[in-house]
Image (tube, grey):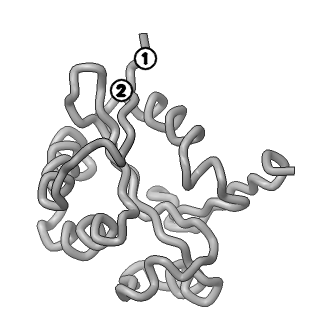
Amino acid sequence: MEFIKKISNEKINTSDYEKLGFAVACMLMNRNYSLYHIKTLQQWTQKAISHNQFKVFFNNTNHPIGYMTWAFLREDTLSRLSQDPLFLLHDSEWDEGGTLCIMDFCCKPGSAIYCINDLKKLPPINTAKKVVWRSRKTGKILCKDNTRMHG
């Protein structure tokens, strides 16, 4: 039996507010996120949802266990993001058509491996030639080159 329930985002008829609620539920399960300021939801999560760059993971009992947000950034925007830890994306920068950047990944403790394994099979991860993200521990931008997977 699969741990992550396979639900197509197109088939889920949820409002942006319900998606935000799923994100909050996931944040409350994770001690690294549970004390974040509410303003971060507006600056990062709500913007990703409005750009349809948000994926929520449900377990086989329909409870949200994780989510991911992403942006497609030009090199200059990615450079600013990597240089300044306080940098916030403008609305126009969320989908510039460049490198796939994972902006946020939060999940219930113990479920990360299931969420990651599911992510590897889904767009935008499985179609990206390069994926970048900021390490929580070091603050540095890390990169995964997927060109070998795409030929």
The residue located at (58%, 66%) in the rendering is: 100
Which amino acid, mark 2?
A: Lys
Q: Residue shown at 75%/56% (left/top)?
A: 145
Q: Looking at this view, name the residue that lies furthest to the top.
A: 1
Does the image show residue 33? yes
Spot occupied by residue 41 in the image (x, y as percentages of width and height): 20, 67
- Residue found at x 19% / y 38%: 29
Q: Element under label 1?
A: loop
Q: Is residue 127 positioned above or below 51 on the image?
A: above
Furthest toward the right, the residue is 151
Residue 151: image location, x then y, percent: 87, 50
Residue type, label 1 = Glu
107, 72: nearer the viewer: 72
Kindly report the distance in space between the C-alpha atoms of the residues bearing marks 2 and 1. 7 Å
Q: Secondary structure at mark 2?
A: loop
Q: Position of residue 78 (x, y in %)?
A: 57, 80
Asked where in the image residue 70 lies, by quadrant, the reply is bottom left
Residue 124 x/y as whole percent: 55, 55
* Residue 138 showing in the rendered view: no
Q: Mark 1 sits on what residue? A: 2
Q: What is the count of numbered marks?
A: 2
Residue at the location (54% across, 62% down)? 133
Q: In the picture, residue 26 is in which quadrant?
A: top left
Pointers 2 and 1 in contact (C-beta within 8 Å): yes
Q: Is residue 45 above or below residue 127?
A: below
